Image (cartoon, rainbow, N blue to C red):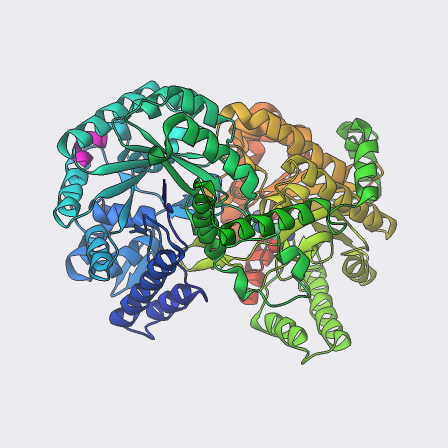
C-alpha cells in the first residue's frame, strides 16, 4: 500500500507567494527574489510531506499563478498577441502578461480569460486555441521542478494536467474546428516531456483528468482511448496515475478502467458509492488510488469510515494495488490548523474537529498505518483519539439546536410562496412606491475607500471604540444618501460601509458559524479567500442589518433598499458541514434571512434586495444533478423572501451569469425585480429573458463596474434602447452591473450622473 498526494497548497504558510508576486509586479523585488520564494515554498512542502511519511511526493503542483496557465506555457500555446513580448522578455514575464494583461512600453495587451475550476472557487486561465494550433515545448518548468526535487533527495511524482482535460478546459477562438482535433498536434509535446522526465529518472507520472468524472461526448471518449494507448505504448516502464475528482466515474467507468494506465484515482468523498462498482470492474493490471480524505473541506477525517473503504479494496485487489490519498489536490484546503490561535472566533472544541492541508497529510499516513495488519500501540492511540473527536462532534450541543430543527420540520411549501402572484403584487407595489419609468438604483455597495477600510482596521485593533466607529460610518452613509438624492437616483442604498465582505458580515452575526485567522485558500493568482466555517445549526439571534437600513431610511423621503446576502450564496462561499445535506444547511440559512427580511419590513423598509450571485456557480458538474440542486436552491431563496406583504418589493442580484439553460428556475425564484450583469455582453444576456417572456421586472446592468472606465450617457441610452426591443418598458430598471465597492468615488460619481441622465432621456419618449 502506498500513500500519495495529488497536490499541495502553494501559497505558503503565511501567503508568502502572494506577497512576493505582488511585490514583483509592483517592481519592488526582482525576478531572482521571486524565484527564491518559489523554491523555498516547494522545498518546505516536499520536506513536510517526507517527514510525515508520504510515499509519493508530488512536484509541478507548485505554480506562480495557475497550473493551467503553466501547461499553456509549457506546450507553447501562447496567443498571437503576446508573441512580441515572448521574444524579448523572460519566460515568467510572458506568463504574468498572459495572466494579467500587459500595459507598458507602449503596448496594451489584454489578459487571457479566467474562469472557475470545475465547481471550486479556484479560477484558472482559459487556454485559447486556433484552428491549426501548433504546440511545441516552450517552458521546461515541469522538468526543472522534477530535477530540483531530485537534487534535494525526492524522487517526486510530476503532476501534469492530462492532455484531454487540458484541451477540454480551453476555448476555440475561431470557428470551424473542434478543440479535440488538436490532440494529434499536442501529443508529441506530451511525449517529449515524458521522454525528458524518464531520462532524468522519473518513475511515476500523475495525469489529472477530472473530465473523466463529467459528462463526455462519444468523441472525447475515443480520443481518451487513443491518447493513453499512444502514451503507454511509448513508455511501458513509467507508472501512470490517472486522477479523477469532484464527481464519480459513473457512465465513464468502463472507459476509465480500460485506459492502459497503471493507477486510477477516484474521489470517494464526492462519490463514495462508486467504490463497489469500480472494484467489480477493475482489471487486474490496474491499481486503485482511494481519495478518502476530503481535499475540499476542513473537517477531520473519520478514520473508521475511511478504513472500511480501504479494507474493502484491500480484500478485493490486495494491498499492493491500493493507494491512499486525499480526494483531490489539497490546493483547496487552507494550510495549517496549528496556526489558528484565536479561541474567540474558533473555539478549541470546534478546532478539534478540523484538519487543514498539513493535518490531512498526516491523516493519509495514519490511515495507511491503521490499515496495516498489526498497527502498533501509538497508531491505535491515534485511532482512539480520532474516534473521540468524531464522536464529540456528532453529539456536541454546539452543533445541535432543537429549535432550529423543529422549525425546519414545520416549514412548508406555503412558506416558500408569496401571498399573491407577481401581477397582483406589481399593482400594489406601484401604488405604494410610485416609481417612474426606468427607475434608477444601484446594486448596494459604494466605494470602500482606504479611509473606510482603515476605520475598520482601527476598530478591530481597538484604536477606535464602537461609538467612534459608528459615528464615522454614519457620516459616510449620510454623505452617500445625500449624494444619491442630489443626483436624483430613485431607489437609494445605504452603501454597505459597515461590511467587510458580503458573506463574512452575515456569518459573524449568525449562530453556527466560526472564523479562521489564517484559513486562506487560493482563489486566483495572488488572490486568496478565507471562507467562514459553518459548523452547526444556523439561526439569527438578533437583527443584522436593520440598524443601518433604518438609519439610512430615516435620512430621506426616498426609498432606501435593504441589502442582504441570500442563503445559497452564503452556503456556496463558506466551508460547510458534511454531517448533513447542503440543502438542509441552506434551508436553515434561508430561515435566518427570512427573519431579517421580515424585520426590515417591520422597520419600514419597503424594498429589500437579497443577493444571490452564486446560484449559478453552485450547479453540479453533471447535468443530471442540476434539477435536484435548483429545486432546493430556488426554494431556499423563496423561503427567505416570502414572509412579506405584497406591497414589499423583493429584489435579487446576480453577476457573471448566463441564464439560458436555467431561466425557468430564475423565474421560479419569483423576485419582483432582478438586476443582472449585462453591459459587457451588450444586452445579449437579456435574450434569455426575452425568449422566455420573463414576467417580472429586470434591471440589466448598463455599465461595467469592473473597469475604471466612465461610460457616456449616450452609450447607456443605446443599451436601454436595445433592452426595450426585447423587454417591455414597464419591466425595465436602470442600474450598474454590480456593487461599486472596488471603484473610486470620482469614477462612480461621473458614471452614476450619466446613468441618471440616460434614464431620463430614455423616458422622454413615453
Ligand atoms: N450588494 C453587493 C454589493 O453591492 C453585491 C455584490 C455582488 O453581487 N457580488 O457589493
Ligand atoms: Zn454582482
Residue 459 vs 702, above or below: the answer is: below
Q: Main secondary structure of the magenta part?
A: helix
Q: Quadrant of residue 571?
A: top right
Farthest right residue in view: 602
Residue 172 visible in image: no
Give the x, y percent position of residue 751.
55, 57
Give the x, y percent position of residue 303.
54, 43
In front: 666, or 481?
Answer: 666
Magenta part of the protein: which range?
A: 182-187
* Left or right of residue 225, residue 570 in this image: right
Give the x, y percent position of residue 2.
35, 42
Q: Quadrant of residue 16?
A: bottom left
* Left or right of residue 670, residue 241 in this image: left
The image quadrant where one finds the C terminus is top right
Residue 401 visible in image: yes
Give the x, y percent position of residue 53.
37, 54
* Left or right of residue 546, residue 520 in this image: left
Amino acid at each position: 500500500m502506498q500513500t500519495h498526494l495529488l497536490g499541495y497548497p502553494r501559497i505558503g504558510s503565511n501567503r508568502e507567494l502572494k506577497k512576493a508576486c505582488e511585490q514583483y509586479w509592483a517592481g519592488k523585488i526582482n525576478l531572482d527574489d521571486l524565484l527564491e520564494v518559489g523554491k523555498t515554498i516547494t522545498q518546505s512542502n516536499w520536506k513536510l510531506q517526507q517527514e510525515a511519511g508520504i510515499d509519493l511526493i508530488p512536484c509541478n503542483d507548485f505554480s506562480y499563478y495557475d497550473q493551467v496557465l503553466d501547461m499553456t506555457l509549457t506546450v507553447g500555446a501562447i496567443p498571437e498577441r503576446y508573441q512580441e513580448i515572448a521574444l524579448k522578455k523572460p519566460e515568467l514575464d510572458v506568463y504574468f502578461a498572459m495572466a494579467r494583461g500587459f500595459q507598458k512600453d507602449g503596448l496594451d495587451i489584454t489578459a487571457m480569460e479566467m474562469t472557475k475550476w470545475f465547481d471550486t472557487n479556484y479560477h484558472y486561465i482559459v487556454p485559447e486555441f486556433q484552428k491549426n494550433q501548433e504546440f511545441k515545448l516552450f517552458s521546461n518548468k515541469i522538468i526543472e521542478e522534477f530535477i530540483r526535487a531530485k537534487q534535494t533527495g525526492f524522487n517526486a511524482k510530476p503532476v501534469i494536467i492530462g492532455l484531454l482535460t487540458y484541451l477540454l478546459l480551453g476555448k476555440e477562438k475561431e470557428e470551424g474546428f473542434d478543440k479535440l482535433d488538436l490532440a494529434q498536434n499536442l501529443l508529441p509535446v506530451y511525449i517529449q516531456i515524458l521522454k525528458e522526465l524518464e531520462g532524468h529518472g522519473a518513475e511515476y507520472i500523475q495525469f489529472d483528468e477530472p473530465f473523466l468524472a463529467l459528462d463526455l461526448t462519444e468523441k472525447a471518449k475515443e480520443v481518451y482511448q487513443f491518447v493513453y494507448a499512444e502514451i503507454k505504448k511509448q513508455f511501458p516502464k513509467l507508472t501512470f496515475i490517472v486522477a479523477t475528482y469532484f464527481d464519480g466515474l459513473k457512465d465513464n467507468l468502463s472507459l476509465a478502467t480500460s485506459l492502459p494506465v497503471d493507477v486510477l484515482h477516484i474521489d470517494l468523498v464526492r462519490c463514495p458509492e462508486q467504490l463497489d462498482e469500480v472494484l467489480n470492474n477493475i482489471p487486474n493490471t490496474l491499481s486503485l488510488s482511494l481519495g478518502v480524505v476530503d481535499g475540499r473541506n476542513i473537517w477531520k477525517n473519520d478514520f473508521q469510515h475511511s478504513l472500511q473503504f480501504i479494507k474493502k479494496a484491500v480484500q478485493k485487489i490486495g494491498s499492493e494495488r491500493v493507494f491512499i490519498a486525499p480526494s483531490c489536490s489539497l490546493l483547496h484546503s487552507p494550510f495549517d490548523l496549528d496556526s489558528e490561535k484565536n479561541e474567540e472566533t474558533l473555539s478549541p472544541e470546534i478546532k478539534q474537529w478540523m484538519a487543514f492541508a498539513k493535518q490531512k497529510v498526516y491523516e493519509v499516513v495514519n490511515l495507511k498505518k491503521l490499515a496495516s495488519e498489526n498497527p502498533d500501540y501509538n497508531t491505535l492511540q491515534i485511532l482512539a483519539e480520532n474516534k473521540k473527536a468524531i464522536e464529540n462532534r456528532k453529539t456536541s450541543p454546539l452543533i445541535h439546536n432543537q429549535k432550529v430543527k423543529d422549525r425546519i420540520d414545520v416549514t412548508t411549501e406555503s412558506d416558500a410562496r408569496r401571498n399573491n402572484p407577481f401581477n397582483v403584487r406589481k399593482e400594489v407595489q406601484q401604488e405604494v412606491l410610485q416609481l417612474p419609468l426606468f427607475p434608477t438604483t444601484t446594486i448596494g455597495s459604494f466605494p470602500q475607500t482606504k479611509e473606510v477600510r482603515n476605520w475598520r482596521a482601527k476598530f478591530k485593533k481597538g484604536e477606535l471604540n464602537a461609538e467612534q466607529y459608528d459615528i464615522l460610518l454614519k457620516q459616510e452613509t449620510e454623505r452617500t444618501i445625500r449624494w444619491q438624492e442630489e443626483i436624483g437616483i430613485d431607489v437609494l442604498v445605504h452603501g454597505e460601509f459597515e461590511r467587510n465582505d458580503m458573506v463574512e458580515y452575515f456569518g459573524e452575526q449568525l449562530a453556527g458559524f466560526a472564523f479562521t485567522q489564517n484559513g486562506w485558500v487560493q482563489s486566483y493568482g495572488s488572490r486568496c479567500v478565507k471562507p467562514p466555517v459553518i459548523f452547526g445549526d444556523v439561526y439569527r439571534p438578533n437583527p443584522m442589518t436593520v440598524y443601518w437600513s433604518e438609519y439610512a431610511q430615516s435620512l430621506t423621503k426616498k426609498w432606501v433598499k435593504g441589502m442582504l446576502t441570500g442563503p445559497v450564496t452564503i452556503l456556496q462561499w463558506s466551508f460547510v458541514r458534511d454531517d448533513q445535506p447542503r440543502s438542509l444547511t441552506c434551508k436553515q440559512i434561508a430561515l435566518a434571512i427570512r427573519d431579517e427580511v421580515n424585520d426590515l419590513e417591520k422597520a419600514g423598509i419597503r424594498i429589500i434586495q437579497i443577493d444571490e450571485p452564486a446560484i449559478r456557480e453552485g450547479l453540479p458538474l453533471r447535468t443530471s444533478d442540476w434539477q435536484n440542486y435548483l429545486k432546493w436552491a430556488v426554494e431556499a431563496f423563496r423561503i427567505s423572501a416570502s414572509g412579506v406583504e405584497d406591497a414589499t418589493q423583493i429584489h435579487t442580484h446576480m453577476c457573471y451569469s448566463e441564464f439560458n439553460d436555467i431561466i425557468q428556475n430564475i423565474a421560479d425564484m419569483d423576485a419582483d425585480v432582478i438586476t443582472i450583469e449585462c453591459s459587457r455582453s451588450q444586452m445579449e444576456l437579456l435574450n434569455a429573458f426575452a425568449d422566455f417572456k420573463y414576467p417580472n421586472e429586470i434591471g440589466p446592468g448598463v455599465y461595467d463596474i469592473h473597469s475604471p472606465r466612465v461610460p457616456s450617457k449616450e452609450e447607456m441610452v443605446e443599451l436601454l434602447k436595445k433592452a426595450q426591443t426585447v423587454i417591455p418598458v414597464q419591466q425595465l430598471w436602470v442600474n450598474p452591473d454590480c456593487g461599486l465597492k472596488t471603484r473610486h468615488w470620482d469614477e462612480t460619481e461621473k458614471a452614476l450622473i450619466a446613468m441618471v441622465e440616460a434614464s431620463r432621456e430614455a423616458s422622454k419618449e413615453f
